[in-house]
């Protein structure tokens, strides 16, 4: 999950321009002109949502099972 985010983020960063005047056109360039750029961008966007879902499920599981209670100290 996190590895996919890192890899797709690196790929997108190679083609993205962080300038006020050209940011939108660089995203359009990624989606239209880069081979499978639209797929990489969607994987990165949906992967971020999936990553947060995994985090929330992990926190919810810890709350449900009470794993934050009764920690023994040595």
Image: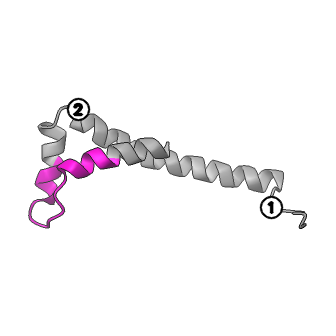
- On screen, 11 above or below 21? above
Name the residue carrying label 1.
68
Mark 2 secondary-structure assignment: loop
Which tag, 2 or 1, sits closer to the chain's start? 2
Give the image location of residue 15, x and y in percent. 18, 48
Using the image as rendered, state which of residue 74 and residue 60 is in the foreground. 74
Give the image location of residue 50, x and y in percent. 49, 44
Using the image as rendered, state which of residue 35 and residue 50 is in the foreground. 35
- Single out the residue that lies furthest toward the top: 35
Per the rendered image, the range of residues in magenta is 9-27
Residue 67 forms part of the magenta stretch: no
> Which residue is at 15% across, 59% downward?
23
Q: Is residue 35 left or right of residue 10?
A: left
Using the image as rendered, state which of residue 11 and residue 58 is in the foreground. 11
Badge 2 crowding class, 10 Å Cα cut-off, few under 14, some 14 to 19, many 20 or more, is few
Badge 1 crowding class, 10 Å Cα cut-off, few under 14, some 14 to 19, many 20 or more, is few
> Which residue is at 34% across, 43% downward?
8
Q: Residue 36 carries which label?
A: 2
Give the image location of residue 54, x and y in percent. 58, 46
């Amino acid at each position: 999950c996190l590895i996919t985010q890192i890899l797709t983020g690196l790929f997108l960063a190679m083609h993205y321009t962080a300038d006020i005047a050209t940011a939108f056109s660089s995203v359009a360039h990624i989606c239209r002109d880069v081979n499978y750029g639209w797929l990489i961008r969607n994987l990165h966007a949906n992967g971020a949502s999936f990553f947060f879902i995994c985090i929330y499920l992990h926190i919810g599981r810890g709350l449900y099972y009470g794993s934050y209670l009764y920690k023994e100290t040595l």
